[in-house]
């Protein structure tokens, strides 16, 4: 039953979105907008999954864990190439709190995406359109 709730296609699309947003925001603006990136991509994942509230949250968790690990690895590579290779242990230990926050933001985004999808279905039904 749990495997039926997991939708890999939206999760993969969300991971691609968050990596693209993270790389663009880090390299172009120099700002780390990872939490906002995870929220936006989580909303997209929750919207694409549809289903129930639990499906949006579950897929948000999976997306958050995989995406957070990938973003932490990208940051680790950036720091290593910048000459901070001797501090890799410190960098990895300092990435635990942001990783948890990224997962939380992905779950919030997944739930918000579910609610947005539910509201869009509610207001786009033919019954309401005929009443107006």
Image (tube, rainbow, N blue to C red):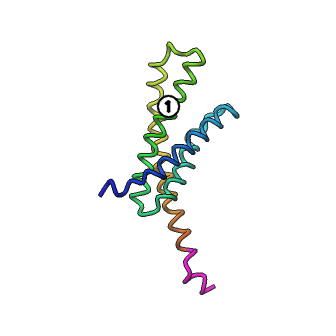
Q: Quadrant of residue 26?
A: top right
Instruction: Locate residue 32, reporting x and y percent.
Output: 61, 34
* Residue found at the very far bottom of the displayed protein: 131
Question: Does residue 127 belong to the magenta stretch?
Answer: yes
* Residue found at the very far right of the displayed protein: 28
Whether residue 55 sits left or right of residue 71 in the image: it is: left
Instruction: Locate residue 59, reporting x and y percent.
Output: 42, 51
* Residue found at the very far front of the displayed protein: 9
Residue at screen point 48% across, 18% down: 88
Taking 115 as reference, is 81 above or below it? above
Number of numbered labels in the structure image = 1
Instruction: In this rendered view, identify the residue nearer to me: 85 or 107.
Output: 85
Local crowd at mark 1 within 10 Å, few (<14), some, or many (≥20)? some
Task: State the predominant SS element of the stretch in magenta.
Answer: helix
Query: In the rendered image, which quarter contains the N terminus?
Result: bottom left
Residue at screen point 54% across, 48% down: 39
Instruction: In this rendered view, identify the residue nearer to me: 25 or 3.
Output: 3
Taking 118 as reference, is 14 above or below it? above
Instruction: In this rendered view, identify the residue nearer to me: 97 or 49.
Output: 49
Question: Does residue 20 belong to the magenta stretch?
Answer: no
Residue designated by label 1: 72
What secondary structure is found at the residue carrying circle 1?
helix
**Stretch of the chain drawn in magenta:** 123-132
Q: Quadrant of residue 78?
A: top right
């Amino acid at each position: 039953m749990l495997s039926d709730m997991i939708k890999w296609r939206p999760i993969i699309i969300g991971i691609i979105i968050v990596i693209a947003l993270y790389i663009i925001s880090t390299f172009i603006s120099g700002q780390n907008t990872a939490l906002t990136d995870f929220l936006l991509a989580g909303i997209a994942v929750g919207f694409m999954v549809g289903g129930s509230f639990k499906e949006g949250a579950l897929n948000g968790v999976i997306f958050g864990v995989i995406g957070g690990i990938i973003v932490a690895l990208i940051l680790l590579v950036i720091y290593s190439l910048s000459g901070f290779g001797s501090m890799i242990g410190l960098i990895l230990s300092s990435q635990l709190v942001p990783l948890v926050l990224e997962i939380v933001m992905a779950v919030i985004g997944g739930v918000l995406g579910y609610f947005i999808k539910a509201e869009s279905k509610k207001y786009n039904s033919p019954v309401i359109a005929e009443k107006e």
